[in-house]
Amino acid sequence: MADEKDKRNILVIEDEVHVRTLVSRLLEKNGFVVRTAEDGLDGLRVLEEFRPDLIISDVLMPNLDGLTFTRALKNRKETKIIPLIFLTAKTDPLSMIEGINVGAKFYITKPFQAEDVLAKVKKVLSERGHRLE
């Protein structure tokens, strides 16, 4: 197993507690270091002290939704290169297109398969040149 310093950091932003817990446990079980946030505003606060290699975010959230969060992320010099995957219940094609247009690498709809989430996480991280074990 990789040393702690070799583990990839992932920020999960999700307002539904059970989904946030499920995704973070899945990722931790697969060797990732995970921090969580309950909405986009909380996600921006977490980014002040935690630098993730990847962000997984819901779209529909209170306070600051995923699309607005992503626009803020992509407008900041220090965070614009962080890749993002949307994990959301919004399944209509226009929402998917909007998600990709604001900068998401993938758009995963709920309910989701754990294997699909892991495969997409590993694909995004391998594209960035991170070694995966």
Image (tube, rainbow, N blue to C red):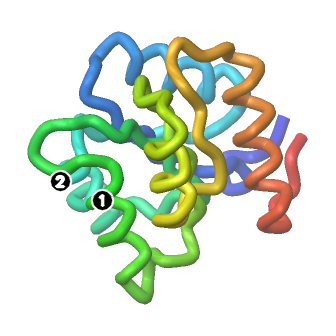
> In this figure, which residue is indicated by the disc labeled 1?
69
CB within 8 Å, label 2 to label 1: yes
> In this figure, which residue is indicated by the disc labeled 2?
41
What's the residue at 38%, 70% (across, down)?
73
Q: Residues within 10 Å of mark 2 (few under 14, many from 20)?
A: some
What's the residue at 22%, 36% (across, down)?
61
Which amino acid type is shown beneath numbered disc 1? Phe
The percent position of residue 80, horizontal first and vertical second, equals 48, 77
Q: Nearer the viewer, residue 12 or 33?
A: 12
The percent position of residue 94, horizontal first and vertical second, equals 47, 45
What's the residue at 33%, 62% (across, down)?
47
Q: Secondary structure at mark 1?
A: helix
Quadrant of the image occupied by residue 95: top left
The percent position of residue 103, horizontal first and vertical second, equals 53, 65
Of pointers 2 and 1, the one earlier in the residue sequence: 2
* Left or right, 8 with reference to 72: right
The percent position of residue 5, horizontal first and vertical second, equals 67, 56
In the rendered image, the quadrant that contains the C terminus is: top right
C-alpha gap between disc 2 and disc 1: 7 Å
